[in-house]
Image (cartoon, coloured by chain):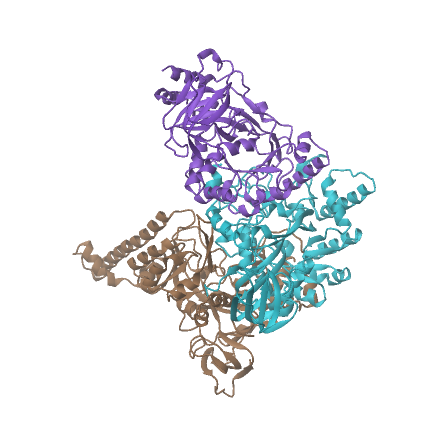
Amino acid sequence: MVSGIEMARLALLGTLIFAGSAWGQFAPDVVIADRFLAPDGTLQPNFTIVLAHGKIKSIRPGKPPASAERVIHHPNAVVFPGLIDVRSTLGTFGATGESALSIDPAANAADLIDVTHRDFGSAIRAGVTTVMVAPAANNLVSGVAATLKTAAVAGHDRFLRSDGPLMFALGSSVWQWDRAPTSRIGSLAMLRESLEDARAGRGHERLVQFTAGRLDGIVVCEESQDVSAALRTFGGGLARFHIVHSGDVHDLARELRGKRPTIVMGPFGLETPPGTISFAATMTREKVPVVFAGGSPGQASDSLRLSAALAVRYGMDPADARLAITTRAAELAGVSERVGALRPGYDADLVVFSDDPLRLDSRILEVYVSGVRVFRENAASFENERDMR
Amino acid sequence: MNKTSVIFTCMIPVFSVATAFSSAPPAKLALQGARIIPVEGQEIARGTVLIENGKITAIGEEVEIPYDAMVVDVSGKVLFPGMVDPHSARALDIPNENLPVTPFLDVYDALDPSKAYFEDALRDGVTAVHVIVGNNCVIGGLSRVVNPIGMSPDEMTIAAPVAMKLSVAPKRGSGRMVQMATLRETFLELADYLERLAEKKYEESLEEKGELLEVGPKEARRLGKDLIRPDDYDDKHRSLVKLTSGKLLAFVYCGTASDVAQAITLAKENGFFDRMTLVLGPDCFKAIDEIKASKRPVILDSELIYRETDPLTGEIRETFVPKVFSDALVKFSLQPSPSNSLAERYLNYQAARCVRHGIRRRKALKSITVNPAKAAGVGDRVGSLKVGKSGDIVVFSGDPLDFNSWVEQVYIRGILAYDRKDDVRLKRLLGDEPAEVSTAADDSSAEQPNGEGTNKSGRKTEE
Amino acid sequence: MMRGYTQDARAAHAVLLVLMGAMPAFAGDVVIKAGTLHTGHGQVIADGMLILRDGLVFQVGRSLPVPKGATVIEVAAGSITPGLIDANAAVEADDEVMLTSSKSPRDVLHDFFCPRHRHKKVMGCCGSTCSRAVRHVEGGTCSECGFPNAKPVLAVGTRPGRSLVEDSSEVIPHTRVIDSVDLRARDFDRLLRGGVTTVFVAPDSAAVISSQGAIVRTGGAIDRRILRETAAVKATIGVEPSWRGRGNGRPWGNRVTFMTRRPTTRMGVGWVFRKAMYDTQGEATGVSPYGADTPSDAAMKTLRKVLRGEIPLRIQARQRHDISTACRLADEFSIPFVLEEATEAHHCIEELKRRNVSVVYGPIYISPRPDGWREWEIGQGRLHTMKTLLDSGIETALTAHELRDEDGLARQAMYAIRFGVAADKVLSAVTATPARILGIGDELGTLEPGKRADVVLWSGRPFEATSSPLVVLIDGEIVLDRRKQG
């Protein structure tokens, strides 16, 4: 019962003030995992994860040390790092679009996020502990993205990163009728110009940094031809690709081969054509890293797991699918030093699943952010879920 | 080009040949020395066609030429029957009326002899056109077969009335259910009308005799049936009675494959199944089994290739429609494209495409001559070079399926209706233009929308 | 988001293409034998034979020894030609409508023709422009023109309208068509089926000085299709830039805004061209350009290269006075150029000859007044223009432009033959000549040892009404094989 109330308060208020120690947080010393996500994406059995000060202290096989007081152990459970949604608009009220300038590197998504927004609660309940929020893809250069935790824990900053990656966009949402560019050819020409300027040291500092390789970038492409254009414009290696209209990307593998950008796909639904989904498997076979986007809160937060599960159904290796919603996503957002994997020194963002999360009948038992439990499953939590809506 | 110059250039050939046409035809004409493709019967490598009083009287390698015949040396050329356009509304000012059920209409009233279409028909070797209302109707009206030459519909007509136009594909603005309901209702109303008419006729006949009506209405209707004379029908029902009593052909338009079964049912129910020709939309080949079983002739859409996209794979599937019919041994007729600017406007090119896609040459040739002639009810008079048939002959410079062949001359009923030598307009296009015509064509950039302006003003000048 | 999934049906194709892509590039020698072999520079070999090796033509001749393990393709009644090259392909027009129709796009667009070419309401049902690049939002009727709620008219290859028509300026030589080319578009399949293996993807004619065109192959591996990303800058002289594109309204009062920058007359078109060139010249000498129509820096950078002759200039002009204007403008800045479309070129033979202008002529319409909306610019075409151009010694290539009927460029060749051009000259006009004009003559256009092996095997004589391409090879690889269909 108590945890039910706890849950309700967390979901409703989730703020820095209330999420402190006031209502008796639970922070375990040790989590025993019957299976846990290893860095290679496989599930390894019988490990003990030792936590300290919100970080993972060590991961080792066998039993917990005798000194451990607070031990969490769910039989048959699978422990995952917190899931990461790289395509979220949580806390922005959908107001990420700025159309004053088509090249707008100064914009920063961190400026528009309301960290107290209640939608963060539903992300937590789906096991999503980190989200990347980016300015909308309606400018050629739309600003920098911000990456933050979905729950507040006292003594830990919500923001993992608020200065990147730099977001680019190609495709029809960029072309607007009352400002240049108005077309695809115009947008590419304009982008090429500003990149050229930036290489010569002119233009906004962020673009200069980007062309010098000191700032990472993501290109949002609507169609496969945008991807081809991006490959030509940016050259290999500099940018990561984020494909929005993933239905159109069928035979990109050949073009992407050897260039190895990360491909972001999804979210997939049951109505997504198999061909689109199987493209994910094709890419991973070509050793192109794939990340699945969740799209919360527009899409259900569970869509991350659904995307991964569907990708496995259509040929993806389960290990790749697990990494696509954790480690690879963290790499894309540029926060892979802290989250996205179960490794010593990383943030203790853990999700305890009742089974492999690729199995859609698995449930989330507990969620930890920076070592603090922020969600615990029981009957009441389902009711709270209903109340929330 | 300003309007007037267009009209003049368009009209010159029409006027010149028209004048020739109205003068007395040569009683006997021999076309000598050409390769003859009669379409029905064996090809003749070098032979003669003799035409007397507008009809073919002899055909062969050795033909005895009467001393008083006009002999035309066409050696090196190819004689081919005048081609037949089986279904054309392009001679009408508009293809369809707004009213849905118009069996009382006759294309006679809307046929415009000055339409550039007829001029092009001659130029392209078409000697008979089945003029019929368009497909956007429920019951459209009566059609007729005309030669593309003459100054009035009467002068042009070679057969009328020929067919009633019906459509089972929904008229624009209505749905499929309304379309079928309207059709059924029309024929039910006809039956009702006939019964009442019979009853009335019986009563009248009694009155004449001064007798009193002693039978019930049912009996009166039965007895009165035979008393009906053709004059008794009103305009609305006269043509429908002709249709259901076997005096008219039926041209039934099916827009999609699902319409075919409807058309067959409708025809069977109302007694015109045996005289029905199916006018098919591009995808009707999917109902090939029904069409084959019905053994009815078909007229294919001018779009010979049907393209569709697989909804799942996105692959384009192309079907060459005539091949489907050819493989199923269904007799088909081809239509020329309504667009003037493409090669598909030539019926012989349409046939050549059939050969390109693996249909036998003989069948392809039939589909632009004999088959459309039969479909339009004039198979006994035109469509092939045969003794007894009308002297409608196209003189090609080479094989009709060779795109380089030109229509050199066209004879209709043995009269020279078109000669490329005198085709001023074509000459001008090919660079052989008289000086005064080319100077008249300077003022060009006027931004006027296309087309009909020519014809409208064309009529004006004529008046 | 969801739209993307349900809309795109091509996805399942993906697997197939990817597997194809995994094939080795050059599988082995290919031997093609046919009744006649046309090398493309006038030579015709009876019972000819062609050996392809490593994607190149290895040997051309008669009864050559067949290399071991070679794939042999033999069609006794057939004939071999180089792959056709369209030097001015408007890879445009819509997918859906075109798919169910062999009508010319001009006709199709005519069906959807908006009598008012100008759409101010950009956000209305007509995406941007109504004239050439109609992109109708599904499910609506345009309040201005009553456009039907028909299938959206979408481009293939290049997407039309907003994709290819950059409305922010009328001088956009810094933009590149290649950015808008979808190499996976079905339009390329259609070209390929017609025997066309290489195209110059033409920029749109809405801007006075338009984009840089690209040269691409129509088939083969996706990553080897682009031959030249930037091949030439296109300019348009004529009425089109004055009413295409954005509304082209005259300025209200004295305000010249984003919405009112286009020329509205032929004079304006000439002025914009001139100003762009003078501004570029002036800037180089330190005079900073001014005025509302000043081209952007990026545009001037490209124009400098055009003025120096580093990037070829192509000018589209249809009517005779436009052709003359093009010649005058080129004289003014002493830039050599290639003339495109050239509908009334038969009136301008001397002018063109004197300047040694090459022409990419076409398309030919059988009727001089084709149904359609561009009639007033092409209404004075003549069927003999191609013959007249060739007879007078002007280097002339033939193009089908946006026409994609059953046989496309082959049909244009068929027309040209009907209208008086000798068959071998016509073949050159769709192979060797366009290759030369495009500057790829040393790679493509003829079947000579050492050239790239782009080959079409026809079922009969080429450009005959009764024959069609049976097998098409690009770089020695079979990309189309219709032999089984018979």
In the rendered structure, the colour chosen for chain B is brown
Q: Looking at the image, which residue is at 55% across and 33% down? A: A332
Left or right for B269, reference B98: left
Left or right: B269 in relation to C220: left
Residue shown at 79% from the left, 51% from the top: C333
Give the chain coloured cyan. Answer: C
Reply above or below: B356 against C181: below
Residue C363 appears in view: no
Instruction: Choose between C429 and C405: the one closer to the eye.
Output: C429
Q: Residue furthest top?
A: A22
Q: Is residue C189 left or right of residue C166?
A: left
Number of numbered discs on residues: 0
The residue closer to the viewer here, B115 or A47, is A47
Residue A264 placement (x, y as % from top left)? 52, 37
Give me the chain that's purple. A
The image shows residue B78, relative to residue B288, as above or below, that is: below
Q: Give the camera-side residue of A216 and A386.
A: A216
Residue A296, horizontal then vertical, whole percent:
48, 29
Residue C154's place in the image compared with B362, above or below, is above
User: Please, which residue is most extreme toward the left here?
Assistant: B214
Horizontal and vertical percent position of residue C467: 52, 67
Q: Nearer the viewer, residue B153 or A28?
A: A28
Q: Can residue B2 be seen in this snapshot?
A: yes
| Image spot of residue B352 (x, y percent) | 50, 67
